[in-house]
Amino acid sequence: MAAAICLNPSPETRSARLTDSHGRVIHDLRVSITDRCNYKCVYCRTGESVAHAESAIAAGLEAPTHYAELTIEEYLRLIKLFVGLGITKVRLTGGEPLLRRGLVELIQELGSLRTLTGEPLDVALTTNGHLLGRLAAPLKAAGLDRVTVSMDAVDEPTFERITHVPGSFQAVLGGIRAARAAGLTPIKINCVLLRGFNDDQVESFARFARREDVVVRFIEFMPLEEGRLWTPEIVVPLREIVDRIGRVLPLVSLPPLEASETARRYTFADGIGEIGIIAPVSQAFCGACSRVRLTSDGKIRTCLFSQIEHDLYGHMRRGDGDDELREYIFQIVQGKEARHHIGEPGFLKPSRSMIHIGG
């Protein structure tokens, strides 16, 4: 239960940029617009949630949500509040956001927003790519800037063993190519590596990056799954990934594009293609974190590993005005955690898994 916060809207809040008590400027908002998903990836969802989803789909229903979803209009109102406090980048996530009705309309509205400096809002989306083939062009036309596809293998049998969905590999590959044709570039491919599970895909992904003209980003496995799969031994660390790729395709380090960038960037020695490695476990980047998250049911999470959520939607539902809501956001972000504590004694997983928090 969050501590009570005194809401006395101040004129300063209206023009203030979001900063936390550690001096970090917050400019990146991740918004989950559903926790439904049409995949059943084994490292993400437990058998119980998979069985529940399969039963609904077999009955001709949509995959169920675990938490409530807001209306598109409600998400838009909340996002506008954050933009008014200095957010410059919004990434729509899930679950699987392409399942959400009204997505194209939401992106159209977001595309019309301007940041505090008058620049267009940067709007991106993370998807599993299964429905991207038919939606890439409409999303681009609506104003989407770029897309990231979660893809944990480039070998078809391995990929479908992970997703538990026949035909998923070809659907995702087609979606990636449709996104490139639509101009949703640069396309980033996120691969979560687990030792003994899909770590044999590293070198193949490097070749895939060059062949498909995409940026492949490997992500160290974090303790955000529904079950209790995570152990330090399962994590494939940054140094190992770089060494393995370098033995077959020499890499050259690239400078960061901005201080808060999460990925260490590399190109190949011939300059063709790019690899990124996001290493929150072995080389945490908390000191430059610029992100907050909004869950599908309207809760603010100041860190993936927060133990407390803050009910922004609850304040909106009870009738708080925009000034009061901005003041609430401002004060919550002031309390953002200094860092996560993965691997330390006493570490606690968050109460929600990644599918319910939003990527």
Image (cartoon, rainbow, N blue to C red):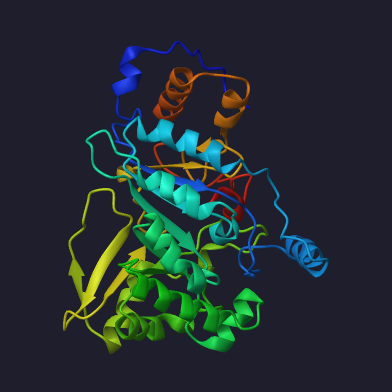
Residue 347 picture location, percent across and down: 55, 46
| Left or right of 243 in this view: 271 | left
Residue 24 picture location, percent across and down: 30, 36
User: Which quadrant is home to the N terminus?
Assistant: top right
Which residue is at 82% across, 65% downward? 55
- Residue 311 visible in the current orientation: no
- Residue 326 visible in the current orientation: yes
Up the image or down, 20 lies above or below 58; here it is: above
Up the image or down, 270 lies above or below 134; here it is: below
Which residue is at 51% across, 58% downward? 222
180 or 17, nearer to the observer = 180
Up the image or down, 267 lies above or below 355; here it is: below
Residue 13 picture location, percent across and down: 35, 19
87 or 340, nearer to the observer = 87
| Left or right of 332 in this view: 111 | left
Residue 197 picture location, percent across and down: 56, 78
Which residue is at 55% across, 19% downward? 320
Quarter where residue 167 is shown: bottom right
| Left or right of 324 in this view: 239 | left
Disc tally is 0
Which residue is at 29% across, 23% downward? 15
